Image (cartoon, rainbow, N blue to C red):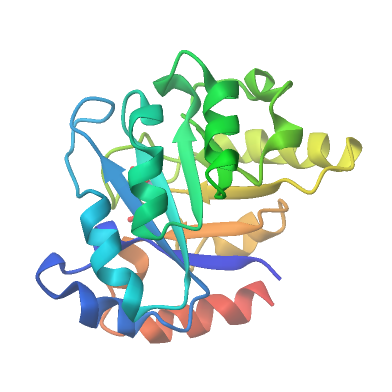
Amino acid sequence: MAELLPSILAADFANLHNEIMKVEEAGYLHFDIMDGRYVPNISFGPDIIKALRPYSRQVFDTHLMIVEPERYIDRFVEAGCDVLTFHYEATRHPHRVVQQIKEAGCKVGIALNPSTPLDNLDYLLEDLHQVLIMTVNPGFGGQEFIPAMKEKISKLRKTIDERKLKTLIQIDGGVNLNNLSELKDLGVDLFVIGSAIFGAEDPAGVIKKANSILK
Ligand code: DX5
Ligand code: ZN
């Protein structure tokens, strides 16, 4: 079954511990790390993840929207991340960063911005736990899903299946209860959802509804 990853970026930063309790039904938490250079926004760093780690048994899925992510891999692994996804466009040496994350004992993903072609991953795909297809331009929650990304998702699904790989497809940005079913049919494995969960009156209720769509 596909999985939901609530994105903390959309949560109440003044009450993060309570906020993650509201979404403990989800098997994952998604942490958006933004440095104000790779993306215009600045969010938070490894210390927030470290502070929350003791209060959750969920998979900590961390999305590094930072330049030269190789500088911070150890900090995020020590903080308790289970999966580290970096942006292909943010480093000169993506293959080396993949090796570095795996050697640190963490699962590894690569994120592609909407305009970055899939074939950049031809010689990386088999080494990846997941590929994150950005369905908005990175940096902010609450944006509209970019429809052209549906074709990109289908192409990646076809490639992974043809090559008989176990690499998971993750999407992130503008996902909600209205488009979830259609996106599930494209073969997505991991759905990052921010504002549609934390912006709702009843986040746990949204997760229940979303899980019933995904099962
Ligand atoms: C955007 C982040 C996303 C964002 C998703 O740069 O990577 O994870 O928080 O938020 P929504 O679901 O509101 O688009
Ligand atoms: Zn994200």
Task: Provide residue 7's location: percent of width, then percent of height.
Answer: 36, 60
In terms of image quadrants, where is residue 125? top right
Give 197 or 66, whichever is nearer the viewer: 66
One can see residue 174 in this view:
no
| Quarter placement of the N terminus | bottom right
Q: Is residue 121 above or below residue 167?
A: above
| Quarter placement of the C terminus | bottom right
In terms of image quadrants, where is residue 19? bottom left
Task: Provide residue 80's location: percent of width, then percent of height.
Answer: 40, 60
The reply, left or right, for residue 15 in relation to residue 76 is: left
Task: Provide residue 175's location: percent of width, then percent of height.
Answer: 46, 56
Report the residue at 37% width, 34% height from top.
Answer: 137
Report the residue at 66% width, 46% height from top.
Answer: 129
Q: Is residue 42 above or below residue 62?
A: above
Report the residue at 51% width, 16% height from top.
Answer: 93
The reply, left or right, for residue 92 in relation to residue 67 is: right
Give 180 or 74, whichever is nearer the viewer: 74
Task: Provide residue 72's location: percent of width, then percent of height.
Answer: 34, 36
Give 41 or 106, whichever is nearer the viewer: 106
Q: Residue furthest top?
A: 92
One can see residue 14 in this view:
yes
